[in-house]
Amino acid sequence: MDESWRVLEHLRLWLPGGALALLAAGACAALLFSGNPSIGRRIAHVCSALAGAAQAAAGIVGLSGGTLTVAHVRGVLPFTDILLQVTDFSAFFLLVIGAVGLAATIYAAGYVKAYEGRRSAPLLHAGMLLFIAAMAAVVMAGNVFTFLLAWEVMSVVSFFLVMYEHERPGTKRAGFVYVVMTHIGTVFLTIAFFILQHYSGSFEFARMGQASLPASAQSLVFVLALIGFGTKAGLVPLHIWLPRAHPAAPSHISALMSGVMLKTAVYGFLLITLHLLQPGPVWWGIAVLAVGANTALFGVLHALGEVDKKRMLAYSSIENMGILFMGIGAVLVFQATGQKAAASLALAAVLFHAMNHALFKSLLFMGAGAVLKAAHTANMNLLGGLIRRMPWTALFMLAGSLAMAAMPPLNGFVGEWLLFQSLFALGFDGPATVLRLAGALAVAALALVGALAAFLSVRLFAMTFLAVPRSDEAREAREASLSMRIAMGLLAACCVAAGVLPFVFAGSVQRALERITGISGASSILEISPAAVGGGTGEIAPAAAGLLILCGLAAAWALARAIGGNTRTVRGETWNCGEPLEPRMTYTASGFSKPIRVAFQRLLMPSRVLYADRDPRAPYFAKGFTYTSQLPPLVENLLYKPAMNLLVAGARLFRGIQNGVVQSYLLYLLATLVLILVWRIWR
Amino acid sequence: MILTATSVILVISALLLVWVKSIMSSIKILALQSLFLGIACLALGAQTGSAELYVMAVLTILVKAILIPFILAATMRKINIRREAEKYIGRGVSLLLASGLVVFNYVVTERLDLILLVAEIQTLPHAVSMLLIGLFVMVTHKKAIMQGIGLIVIENGLFLLALSTALGMPFFVEIGIFLDVLVSVILISILSYRMDQTFRSISTDWLRKLKG
Amino acid sequence: MRDMLFELLQIAVIVLIAPLVTGFIKKIKALLQGRQGPRILQPYYDLYKYMRKDAVVSKESSWIFTATPHVVFGATLAAAALVPVFLRGSLFSFTGDLVLMVYLFALARFFIAMAGVDTGSSFGAQGASREMFVSSLAEPALFVTMLAAALPAGTTNLSSIVTHAVERGWPTSPAFYMMVVAFAILVIAETGRIPVDNPDTHLELTMIHEGPILEYSGKSLALLQWSASIKQVLLFSLLADLCFPWGLAASADGPALLAGLAVFVVKVAAIGVAVAFVEMSTAKMRLFKVPRLLGAALVLSLFALTAEYLM
C-alpha cells in the first residue's frame, strides 16, 4: 500500500511535466526534420500520442486530490516566475485535454496525409503539438503570468493553425476576426487579473483566493472575466469568430479547438468565480444564466440554418457553451443563496457536460473531416447516402449524433439530466419566488435547446449519410483511413462508456467536488456510484436503462417472430408517386430545417430572394429561377458594423493631422518642445 | 571660458544658417560650425585631461566638419539645378523668429535650476538654442538637403549641451550618435538624388501624397 | 421476486391493452360522426395481418431502416417500465425518472426521423422534419409541466410523485387545473392527434407521424404501429397518474391489483373518450399555427407553476 502510494506520488509529479516535455520535443523534432517530413511527422505524432495518454493518466491520478506543484521556474522573467500546478480542479480538464489530444493525434496520422506535399507541413504538426501543450499549460498555471503566457501562446498558435489553408477563400478573414476577438478578450482578462492582484497583493492563484475584495471590485472583476472568457468561449454577442474560424481550420485542429480550447475558457471562468473571488450576489448567477440561455438558443437556431457541416458544428459548439454557462449560472446562484449541496450538483453537471461535449464534438468534427476528405465537400446539400460507402464512419458519427442529441444511454443524456436536475433544484428549492421562476424558465429554455439539438443531430446524420447521394463526389466517396477510424471509434466508445458508467471514478469526483464547493460528503445532494447517479431530486441508472432498451429490442424481435412466423423481405423501389427516384427529389438539408426558420423568423430574420430570369419577348414564361435563402449575421450587422463605422469615422477625424507635409510634423515637434519648456518654467 | 566663447560663435553660425540663401553656403557654414565645436572639445579635453574627449573631438572634426559636408556637397554637384534654399517664410521674418528663440532660451535657462558639472551656465541657453534653431531650419526649408543640415545642427547643439553639463555623454552613446547622424545624412542625400531624378526637383512639396 | 413478476405483468398489460385503446378511440369517433366504424378489436387483427406478411424494403435504405422498428419498440418498452400503471411504485423506478421517460420517447422519435429520411422519399423526410419540429416546440412546455407536477413531491421520480399525490388528496388550486389542461394539450401533440396531426390519413398535408413510416410494411410496420399505441397508452396513464392518481394499488397483492387494474381501465377509457371529443370538435391546424398552440401550453404551465409558487 505504501509502495503503491509512493509510486502514485511520483507519477503525479512527473506525468504532467513529462507530457509537456514530450510535446515540446515532438514539436522541435517536426521542425528539425523539415527536410525529411515523414520522419518528423511520425516522431511528432508518437510524442503527441504518448503525451496525450500521459496527460489523461495525470488527470485521473490528479483527481485524487491536493495541489501539486509540477514546475516552478524562477527568474525567467524579471518580475515573476513560471508556476505549473495540478489541482484536482485542473486535473479534470487535464484528463479531457489528454484524452481528446490522444484521439486527435491518432486521427491526424491519417488525416494529414492530404497535406503531405506542402512545404509548410512540419509547421502544421509542430503547431498541433504546441497547441496541445499550451492548453495543458493554461489549466496547469499557478500564477497570473503563466496563465496569460500560456493563453497567448494558445491563441497565437491556434491563429496560425486556422490560417494554415490560407489559399482557400474566407480563411484569411476568419483568421483576422479570430485573432482580433481573442485579443480583445485577453485585454479584459488581463485587467481582471490585475485588479485581483491589486487587492490581494500577490500574483499567485493560491494566495489570491484568500483575499477579499470590496463588493464593487468583485463585481467588476466578474464582469471583466465574463467578457474575457466569454469571448474565448463564444458567448453571444462575442461569438462572431467561432463560425468562421472552426470551419476554416483543418479538421483535427477544429476538433481540438471545439473540443478542448473552448473548455479552457470554462476552466478560466470557473477559476475566477469559484476560486479567486468570494461568493457573490445572486445577480451574477442570473446574469450568467441569461447569457447562457441566450447563447444556447442563438447557437442552435443558427446551426439549423447552415448547410456547411463544419459551420453547423461550430454553431452547435456555441449552443453547448451556452448550456454550460447556464449550468455555471446555476452554480453561482446556489453559491449566493448558500445552497451548497445544489451547487455541488450543478458543478458536477457542468464538468460532466464539458467532458461530454469535448468527446462528442471532437468525434463529430473528425467525422466531418473524414467526409470532407472523401467527398471533397462539407455542403450537406451535396452529400447523402454515405452510409453505404463509409459504414464505419457512419456508425461512429451515429454515436456522436446520438450523444449530441442527448439520447439515452449515451453520455450526452447523463450530462443533460444532471443539468436538468440542478435547474429543477433551483425551481423546487430556490429561496425566492423570482429565483424559482428563473429556474423554471431556464428549464424551459434548456428543454427547447435540447430538442432543437436533437433536430440538429438528425439533420446532420440523415442528410450526410442516409438517402441517396446528391452529387458525384458523394457517389465516389471512400471509407476513411484506418487511423481516422480508430480515433473516431475510440471517442465513440468513450461516449458510450461515459454514458453507461458515468462516474467510474466516483470516489475521486466526489472528493474533488467537495473540495471545490466546500461541503462535506454527508450533506451532498449527489450520490454517485459508477453506474448510477442519484440526488435529492431524482435518480437514473443509465446502464440499467440501456439494458432495458436492449431487452425491449430483443422482445420486439422475439414477439415479431412469435406472432408472425418467418417472413421474407424483398427489395423494391421507394414510393415516389410512380416516378423513379432522382437525387434531386430528395429532401435537402435546408428544406429539412425550414419549419424552424419559419417558426423563429422574428428571431432569425431570414432573407429570401427569388429571381426569375425572363425573356423580354415572352415575359410570362421564365427561363430560369434563382432562389437564394440565407440567414443574415444579425449580431455582426446590428452590433459590430455600427461600432466599427463609428470607430472609423472617429479615426478619420484624427487623420487630418497627417497632411503629408514633412515640415508640419517637424513643426509639431518644435511646438511641443517649446510648450514643454514654457510649462516647465511656469510651475 | 573657451567653451562659452565657442558656444556664442556656434549660435551666431546657426543664426547665419537661417539667413543665407544658397545651399553651398549653408554647407560651408555647417562645416565651420562643426570645426569650432571640435576645437572646443579639444580644449576641454586638454583642460580635463580626458582621453575620451580627445577622441570625440577628432571624430567630430573628421565626421561632422569634413565627411558630412563633403557628402552633402557631392550630392549638390550631382543635382545641378536650383542651388537656392527655398523657404516657407522670408529670411527677415525667420531671422527674427530664430532670434526670438534664442532670447526665449535665455529666459528659460534662468528660471530652471540645474546642476552642472562644468559650472558654465552661460553655454546652456546657447546649446538649447542651437537645438531649436536646427529644428526651425528643418521646419522652414522646403528642400530635403536643408533638413539634413538642420539635423546636423541639432546634433551639434546636443553635443554642446552634453559637453557643458556632463563633460560629454558616455562613449558608446557618442559613437552611436555619430553613426546615426552619418547614416541619416547619407539617406537624405540619396533621397534628394532620387527626388531629383523623379521630380526634377528636391522640394519636399512633391512628397505630400505620402499619407495614409 | 413476486414484485418482479407483477412488474412484468404491468408491462405486459400495457403492451396488450394498447391496440385496444386505439380501437376504442376510433370506435368512439365513428359513433360521434354517426357511422358504425370498425370493431374495437380491429387493431389486433391488423397487427396480426401485418406480422404475417412479407415486407418490401426500399433498396435505397440502410441498416438504420431495418433496425428502427426494434429500437423504437425497445425504447417504448423501457419507458413502459418506468410508468406506474396500476401499481403505485414501479420496480424499475431506480432506472430513471420523468426526464428519462421523455428522452426515451425522444430516442424513438430520433430513429423514426432517421428512417424517414433513409429511404430517400420526400414524404418520409417531410414527415421527419415536421415530427422533430413539433416535438421540439412541445418539449419546453412538457418540461415545465413536469416541473409543476413534480413540485409538490420535490422529486422527478415517477413513483414518488404518484405516492405523494395519492397521499395529498384532491387539489383545489387553479394551478392544478391549468397544469392538467397544459398537459392534455401536450398529450395530444405527442400522440399525434387532431389538432396537431391526423393519425388516420396518409396525405402529405397531415402526415407528421405517419410520414416516416410510410415505407414500412410487414413485421416492421406492425412493431411501429404497436409502439405508437403503447406510447399513447403511456401518455394517457401518465396524465392519469399525475392528475388523478387515486386507485393505484399500494402493494402487489391480489384484490388491490385487480382494483387498480379496473380503475386504470376506466381512467384510460375516460381519457380516450375525451380525446375523441377533441378530435371531433376541432379541425387540424396548419403546421405553422401549431407553435401557437404549444406556446399556449407553455404559458399555461408557467402560470400554473407561478401560482403554485405563490401559494
Image (cartoon, coloured by chain):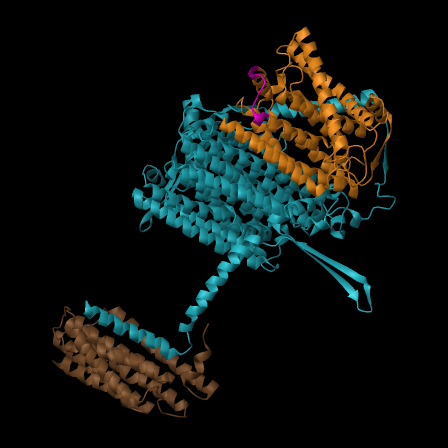
Chain colours: A cyan, B brown, C orange
Front in this rendered view, residue C28 or B60: C28
Residue range (magenta): C167-176
- Asked if one can make out residue A287 in the rendered structure from this viewpoint, the answer is yes
Of the pair C129 and A153, the residue shown nearer to us: C129
Residue C177 sits in quarter: top right
Whether residue A277 is in magenta: the answer is no
State the image coordinates of residue A432 (x, y, percent, origin top left): 45, 31
Q: Is residue A230 above or below residue A683?
A: above
The answer to whether any part of residue A480 appears in the image is no
Q: Is residue A586 above or below residue B37?
A: above
Towards the viewer: A504 or A453: A453
Q: Residue A649, how many percent across, how many down?
A: 47, 66
- On whether residue C171 falls in the magenta region, the answer is yes
Q: Which quadrant, please, contains the N terminus of chain B?
A: bottom left
Question: Residue at (46%, 38%) from the top-left corner?
Answer: A286
Question: Closest to the observer: B211 or A427?
Answer: A427
The number of numbered discs placed on residues in the rendered structure image is: 0
Give the residue at x 56% y 36%: A356
On the rendered structure, is B94 left or right of A507? left
Quadrant of the image occupied by residue A118:
bottom right
**Quadrant of residue B95 within the rendered picture:** bottom left
In this rendering, is residue A168 above or below A357? below
